[in-house]
Image: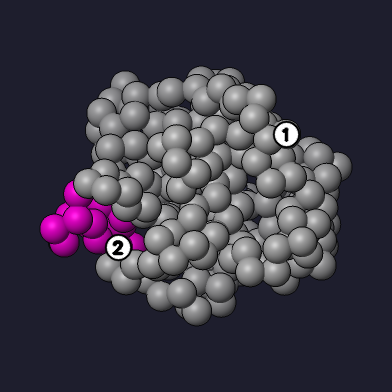
Amino acid sequence: MSNKIFSAFLIRHGDTTLLFDTGLGKEIAKQYQQDMPHWQRPFFRYEAPVKSAYEQISATKVALPSQIILSHSHWDHASGLVDFPGVPVLVANEELALIRNPSNGVGGAWPSQLSSSSIQWQGIRFDAKPYLNFASSLDLFGDGRAVLVPLSGHTAGSIGMFVTVDSGKRFFLTGDLTWNVNAQKQARPKFWAASLLCDADSEQTMRSISQVQSLMQSDPALIVLPAHDGHAQEQLGYFPLWQK
Ligand SMILES: [Zn+2]
């Protein structure tokens, strides 16, 4: 937010690609105009022009994603969904409830982004299978390379994704649990006003933050990547650069 980055992550597995979050899409200007409440505009801005995930991927030979996973349904994560019509979109079942009833701007989920009939929603059911310090998880490929876990608090159905690349390096995409890695390391909640405005359940958010903090302490090699941490993203580089 403050550092104005809206990350979407493309994961390549064999011939298929997955997109985790969509960042700001082609229609962001129209969506913002339609659904961002006027009183919130000073707090939530973005800088045009936006190079959408769709435009970036289709400028290369990389396959368009066959699935999209949303960390949660907020506008700065879901904006690009309509750019990928017909592509299945995985979200936690708790998030589907918000998505099916997006009230104008309240809670940050926007009808202009979520109500299109071209979006193929798929609710996620987590398996009662522990992964690291999470009691339940969903292994997308069955080989431990991309594993979803619940991270509720920021929204009821917020999720995170672990990605293990060929070298064995493990990333953890944490959406909006914290705005940056430092806050996550220190288990610091968001600035109170931001938390009030953005986190649906601040106590549950704090519990999820603590859980990820203890994971970072037990596995210092784990690379945690919040969606809006420009500094962390800068260190890794940007598409079409791959982490291997
Ligand atoms: Zn959010």
The residue identified by callout 1 is: 135
The residue identified by callout 2 is: 51
Q: Would residue 114 appear left or right of 108 to someone viewing this image?
A: left
Q: What amino acid does circle 1 point to? A: Ala
Magenta stretch holds residue 44: no
Magenta stretch holds residue 57: yes
Could you tell me which secondary element the residue under label 2 belongs to? loop
Closer-to-camera residue (28/201): 201
- Residue 165 picture quarter: bottom left
Q: Give the range drawn in magenta.
A: 49-64
Up-down relation of residue 197 to residue 66 (above or below):
below
Q: How far across and down, in percent of the image, does residue 230 sit?
A: 53, 72
The outermost residue toward the right is: 203
Q: What amino acid does circle 2 point to? A: Lys
- Residue 34 picture quarter: top left
Which circle, 1 or 2, is nearer the viewer?
A: 1
Closer-to-camera residue (29/167): 167
Up-down relation of residue 201 to residue 187 (above or below):
above
Task: Say if residue 32 shows up in the picture.
Answer: no
Closer-to-camera residue (172/234): 172
Q: Which residue is drawn at 50% across and 36% down?
A: 139
Q: Which residue is drawn at 27% across and 48% down?
A: 14
